[in-house]
Structure formats: C-alpha cells, structure tokens
C-alpha cells in the first residue's frame, strides 16, 4: 500500500470533483442497464450498458495517481469487509488516511474493469460520492478551499 498525501494529488482530485453534482444526483439509482434487443438469439450473452458520464468518470479516475493496484492492503489494514465498513471508514478518514480513500476508490474503479456491476454499485451505494466529498473536506482543512 503506497503512502498517499492527498495534497500531492490536488490536481487529480480537482479533475474528479467536477463529477460531484452528477454523483449526488445518481446516488441510489441505477446507472447501467442490460442491453436487450428482440433480434438477439437465445444464445447471446447479455451485457451492461453504462451511463456515459460514469464511463468518463471511471476513465478520468483510472488515469490519476490516486489508483493503487494493491488496494487489498487498505482493506486488510483497516479491517474492511463490507460496504457498510467502507462507508464508515470513509466518514472517519483523516488527512493521514489518503491511502485508505484511494484504496477504496481503486477497488471499485479497477475491479469494475473486470466485473460489470462494480461501477454501478459504487454509484448506487454512494461510494464514489462519499470518497470525493471526504477528500474535498480534508483538502479544505489542510490546504486552500476547493472549487
């Protein structure tokens, strides 16, 4: 698990904060649907179709320095086992817990590239929203206010 000082990633966080209004509006709702067409055969595999804003957010997030492929260590170090544990850890994260916030975000962004429902879960459960709000608060406390 890499040591992350959020103030070093201010520009990356600023890029993602643009999505806060969209994430707030979509919390608790579905941002994907299963593609279905009457012309599909019974042997076709259904696949999810995502909201374009979600795809832009994931693409933007994955290109930042906030991603940590060793996110599992954050889960182990903080004893996180469920979505409720994630939400509680996010809400209690301090300025020294940048690795925790990035680890949780990384889990959803990176594993969503392999499993279709992960990104939707992060939006529906408000995980991305909570992380970005917490990062914003922490940066405002320890640095200059954000947009």
Image (tube, grey):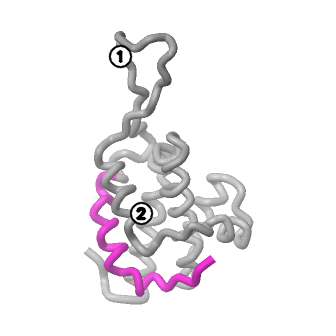
* Residue identifier under label 1: 37
Q: Residue at x 39, y 39 (%)?
A: 31
Residue 45 as seen in the image, left or right of residue 53 = right
| In front of the other: 37 or 14 | 37
Residue 104 at x, y percent in the picture: 56, 63
Q: Estimate how packed mark 2 is, as few (under 14), some (14 to 19) or many (20 or more) residues with alpha carbons within 10 Å.
A: some
**Quadrant location, the C terminus:** bottom left
| In front of the other: 113 or 15 | 113
Quarter of image, res 9: bottom left
Q: Estimate how packed mark 1 is, as few (under 14), some (14 to 19) or many (20 or more) residues with alpha carbons within 10 Å.
A: few
| In front of the other: 27 or 3 | 3
Say above or below: 11 vs 30.
below
Residue 145 at x, y percent in the picture: 31, 82
**Separation of disc 1 and disc 2 at Cα?**
31 Å
Residue 29 at x, y percent in the picture: 42, 39
The reply to whether residue 75 is in sight is yes
Magenta stretch encompasses residue 9: yes
Q: Secondary structure at mark 1?
A: loop
Dot 1 or dot 2, earlier in sequence: 1
User: Magenta segment, which residues?
Assistant: 1-22
């Amino acid at each position: 698990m890499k040591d992350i000082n959020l103030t070093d990633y201010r520009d990356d966080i600023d890029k993602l904060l643009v999505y806060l209004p969209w994430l707030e509006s979509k919390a608790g709702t579905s941002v994907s649907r299963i593609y279905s067409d009457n012309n599909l055969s019974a042997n076709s595999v259904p696949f999810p179709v995502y909201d374009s804003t979600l795809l832009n957010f994931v693409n933007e997030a994955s290109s930042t320095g906030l991603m940590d492929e060793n996110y599992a260590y954050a889960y182990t170090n903080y004893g996180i086992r469920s979505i409720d544990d994630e939400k509680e850890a996010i809400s209690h994260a301090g300025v020294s817990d940048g690795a925790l916030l990035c680890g949780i975000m990384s889990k959803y962004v990176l594993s969503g590239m392999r499993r279709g429902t992960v990104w939707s879960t992060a939006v529906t459960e408000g995980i991305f929203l909570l992380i970005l709000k917490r990062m914003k608060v922490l940066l405002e406390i320890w640095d200059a206010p954000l947009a």
